[in-house]
Image (tube, rainbow, N blue to C red):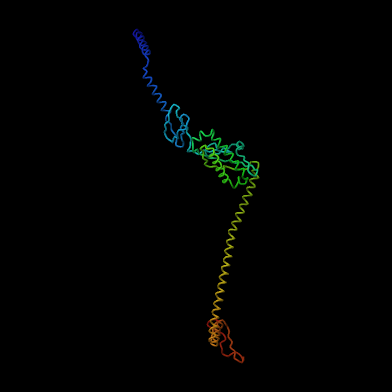
Amino acid sequence: MAEQNREVPQVVEISRRLSAKKPPTKLLILVGLIMVLLWGGNSSFFKVNPEETGVLLRFGHFTRFCQPGLNFKLPFGIEQVYLVKTGRNFKEEFGFRTVEAGVRTSYNPAVFEEESLTLTGDLNVSDIEWIVQYQIVDPYKYLFRIEDPQSAIRDVSEAVVRKVVGNSNVTQVLTTDRALLAANIETELQAILKGYDIGIRIVTVKFQDVNPPDAVKTAFNEVNEAEQQKESLILQAREEYNREVPKARGVAKSRILEAEGYAVERINRAQGESIRFLALLEEYRKAPEVTRRRLYLETMEQVLPRVQEVFIMDRDGAGAVPLLPLRRFDGKEK
């Protein structure tokens, strides 16, 4: 116990001496330099993801774009980097909202009536839901040329849609010309944003759904059904027309061709007969008696085979010559 009491003052004395010594200045400088390098290294290197582009500012002035991968910047706030997703298409929804990808929201449409209800050129109201997809092509302009690009895109989109729809009638909007109207909206929206020079490119404008307001939806559906029935009857009539008219034209053309063929045949036959008659006339003039007899015999050769009974009378007309076979038999009666 006495030995332990003697060791305690010695330990206290050693501790007092060590605490009285100051650490060397070089050691402190080295430790501080290491800490500065570590902190500066952590703030100097940054990563840009594949779908991003980095905008690097030096003392608040634009310096360069940073491509995907590991990049370096000056530490201590000398250079700052802003990451912008330039490889992604952004989407703005009007008249509805999407809760998650692939699932459409089931919110009350009245919440978005201010966006979706649009007046058409013939003073009708249509309930339009549409989307605008855009891409950032110049991240510097997107960040610093305008304070709130998303709000600007939404405001301009609503203005353009109301203008284009306001120049069309309700039938075009609700039925036939949706794609054409969407294309016109896309063209005009891109022109306006290009004038703003905020680094935005419109990818597509698409009508998600177009309906009449709930108050007139029943009446409009009846009109739409009547229009569809009208189109169906028109298509049926066209089908009947396309089937019967070509058939009638074919029959008429066939009859015309038959008549033309018959006319050619009659003309050729008449011309042949006239040539034959002229040839006979020439021969008749050379030898009238011989030609007359030859014609008579040739005619009788054509006529007699068709005659079933032949009667030969004498010159005085006394009666038929006896013992003459009046009928011709060759196994069958002619």
Q: Residue furthest left?
A: 3
Q: Quadrant of residue 273?
A: bottom right
Q: Say which of 183 and 230 sits in front.
A: 183
Q: Say which of 59 and 134 sits in front.
A: 59
Q: Quadrant of residue 37?
A: top left
Residue 249 lies, in percent from the top left, at 58, 63
* Relative height, residue 266 to residue 235 (above, below): below
Residue 258 lies, in percent from the top left, at 57, 69
Q: Quadrant of residue 189?
A: top right
Q: Say which of 88 and 80 sits in front.
A: 80
Q: Residue furthest top?
A: 2
* Relative height, residue 112 to residue 229 (above, below): above
Residue 69 lies, in percent from the top left, at 42, 35
197 with respect to 119 (left or right): left
Residue 114 lies, in percent from the top left, at 61, 37
Q: Quadrant of the C terminus?
A: bottom right
